[in-house]
Image (tube, rainbow, N blue to C red):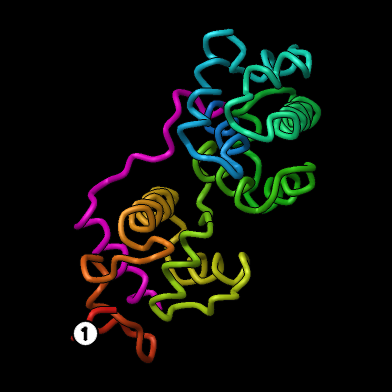
Amino acid sequence: MKKVLMEVYQKLFETFGPRRWWPGETPFEVMVGAILTQNTSWRNVEKAIEKLKAKGVLTPEGIRRLKKPELEELIRSSGFYRLKAERLKRFVDFLFDTFGGEIEKMRTTDLEELRKKLLQVDGIGPETCDSILLYGLNKPIFVVDAYTKRILSRHGVVEEKASYDEVQRLFMEHLPADEKLFNEYHALFVRLAKTYCLKKPNCTSCPLRTLKVKGGRLEARKEAL
């Protein structure tokens, strides 16, 4: 399976090149983006991020001192803004209660221990949690999203109904624990899904069109997928 996953990665990297994802000037900005991007487009998140920057509150201290109605108004473009404001407040409370508001203390915490703590924060699910860990803190953990499942199931690597944990283990158990590899791999999946592996797929131009899984090996396929 390691050969399968690495060949998929190489094919995507050759096609799209480095993605340099996740956009953000600071680790905290990345974390805020991971919470705001739930159920919305990144363009809408960017608008909210810019408003927080313009107000000078895109810091743990800034979010903490904002009153909830003020925060809601600043992030309105991200959708579900009342719910997301509450989640941001809970996350920042967690950051201060557990790490004194210091990102670096959070970064030095053991990955498994930190993940368990993050998942206990109301509103932080596995995908958001792992995005914070990988993109905000450079922890070696693979982020799974709907795009990941769609691509892998269409190419026969996982079952369509595979759980988040099942898909994540596929990468964690067969690839080296390398945050740069996990970062790039997930970003390449996002690009593939948005370009070719749409809900109505464009298989004839897909860079993975000649590949299939058989007996744990990636093989050339004559017909288009």
Q: Is residue 210 left or right of residue 136?
A: left
Secondary structure predominantly adopted by residues drawn in magenta: helix
Q: Residue at x 23, y 79 (%)?
A: 224
Residue 218 at what x, y percent from top left? 30, 81
Q: Which residue is mark 1?
A: 223
- The residue range painted magenta reads 1-28
Asked which quadrant contains residue 207, the reply is bottom left
Question: Is residue 4 in the magenta section?
Answer: yes
- Residues packed near mark 1 inside 10 Å, few (<14), some (14 to 19) or many (20 plus): few
Asked which quadrant contains residue 38, the reply is top right
Asked which quadrant contains residue 196, the reply is bottom left
Q: Residue at x 53, y 31 (%)?
A: 45
Residue 141 versus residue 133 in the image, above or below: below
- Which amino acid type corresponds to the residue marked 1 in the rendered image? Glu
- Quarter placement of the N terminus: bottom left
Question: Is residue 196 in the magenta section?
Answer: no
Q: Is residue 26 left or right of residue 88?
A: left
Secondary structure found at label 1: loop
Residue that extends furthest to the top in the rendered view of this protein: 55
